[in-house]
Amino acid sequence: MPNIQSAKKRVKVSATKNLRNRMVKSGVKTSVRKFAAAVNESPEAAATQYIATTSAIDKAVSKGIIHKNAANRKKARLAKMIAKA
């Protein structure tokens, strides 16, 4: 355990940020799973879920949780999935 006050604070702050980052990443993964399920159902559902999924990915990028290139790669893969269906 840290003895210095600033080190104690850093432990708390990093734990809080880690929790937020995990929540956002989990939300993106859940959204991608919902999109994959929607692709199998119908094109209309897939189109609606595609918008929600790309929005979740973009929000994660704006918060600095996912790298910009990784987000673009994810969105391109989603677009490929919707084009195949």
Image (cartoon, grey):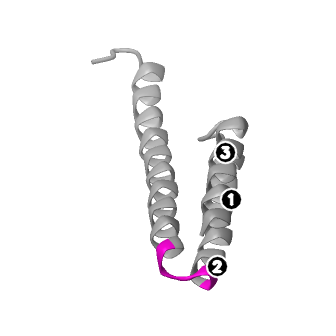
Which residues are the magenta region?
A: 40-44
Relative to 3, residue 43 above or below: below
Question: Is 19 in front, or is 48?
Answer: 48
Q: Residue 71 carries which label?
A: 3
The residue lying at 68 percent from left, 70 percent from top is: 51
Question: Is 12 in front, or is 79?
Answer: 79
Distance between the alpha carbons at the discs numbered 2 and 1:
13 Å
Label 3 neighbour load within 10 Å: few <14, some 14-19, many 20+:
some
Q: Which mark is residue 48?
A: 2
Distance between the alpha carbons at the discs numbered 2 and 3:
19 Å
Q: Which mark is residue 79?
A: 1
Query: Where in the figure is residue 15, as x and y percent of width and height?
Result: 40, 37
Residue 59 seen in render: no
Q: Disc 2, disc 1: CB below 8 Å? A: no
The residue lying at 68 percent from left, 64 percent from top is: 83
Question: Is 54 in front, or is 84?
Answer: 84
Left or right: where 84 falls relative to 6: right
Q: Quadrant of the C terminus?
A: bottom right
Query: Which of the 4 quarters of the picture holds residue 84?
Result: bottom right
The residue type indicated by label 2 comes to: Thr
Left or right: where 75 falls relative to 9: right
Precedes in sequence: disc 2 or disc 1: 2
Relative to 6, residue 69 above or below: below
Precedes in sequence: disc 2 or disc 3: 2
Residue 37 seen in render: yes
Query: Where in the figure is residue 38, as x and y percent of width and height?
Result: 50, 75
Determine whether the residue tagged by mark 2 lies in a helix, strand or loop: helix
Q: In which quarter of the image is the N terminus?
A: top left
Q: Main secondary structure of the magenta part?
A: helix
